[in-house]
Image (tube, grey):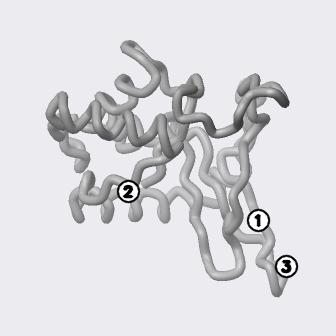
Amino acid sequence: MANSPILKGEPFSEEKTAQIAEQFFRDGFVYIPGVLTEGEVTALREKSDELFADPQLAEITNPDLADVRYIQMGAHADSQEPLPFILRNTIELDAIFRDMLLREPILSLAEAIVGDNCKFCGQNVLRNLPGLSIDRWHVDGSVHFPVTEKMPHHDPRLRMPVMWFTVQM
């Protein structure tokens, strides 16, 4: 990360990390403002825009990936115009995205939630635009939590296992 616009960052204190992890386990999400600097956000946006605008990248596929295209197109809600929507597998496209996975406090929070030596399985950029966005709650894949009909739902004593989660920036 020596020449990267992404900073090394610092982990939160053990107490704050534990507090954030507990909130995540309780609520299923945590909003943590101010983790990235304005410069980091600008650098990520500029690199994302550059990659989204690359016509050659839009044509490249990788059959070894779950999502074979690096740029997934979407259709504008009104005009149906095809627009670049999701930039997939970004860690293969530029080191700036890899550096985000190592940036603190992101890495230490991931370890607090999933466990030490956690692995990142991918990284995508979603470009939400007027007329093209994910604007409803959804689940990628299926919900896997064994709650029988006789068990009280949303019992705070039950901790749902976390096998994977997303970091939205």
Looking at the picture, how far across and down is residue 40, in whole percent? 27, 56
Amino acid bearing label 2: Leu
Q: Are marks 2 and 3 in contact (CB under 8 Å)?
A: no
Residue 48, image x, y percentages: 48, 58
Residue located beneath label 3 in the image: 80
Q: How many marks?
A: 3
Contact check, label 3 and label 1, Cβ < 8 Å:
no
Report the Cα–Cα distance between label 2 and label 1. 21 Å
- Residue occupied by mark 2: 44
Going from N to C along the chain, the mark reached first, 2 or 3, is 2
Q: How far across and how far down the image is residue 106, in percent?
A: 32, 37
Quarter of the image for residue 95 reads top left
160 versus 134 height, above or below: above
Q: Quadrant of residue 1?
A: top left
Q: Which residue is mark 1?
A: 74
For label 1, count other residues whose C-alpha is less than 10 Å away and answer few (under 14), some (14-19) or many (20+): some
Identify residue type, mark 1: Gly
Q: Residues within 10 Å of mark 3 (few under 14, many from 20)?
A: few
- Identified at 50% across, 45% down, the residue is 27
Who's the residue at 47% across and 35% down the image? 25
Q: How far apart are labels 3 and 1 at the CA level?
A: 8 Å
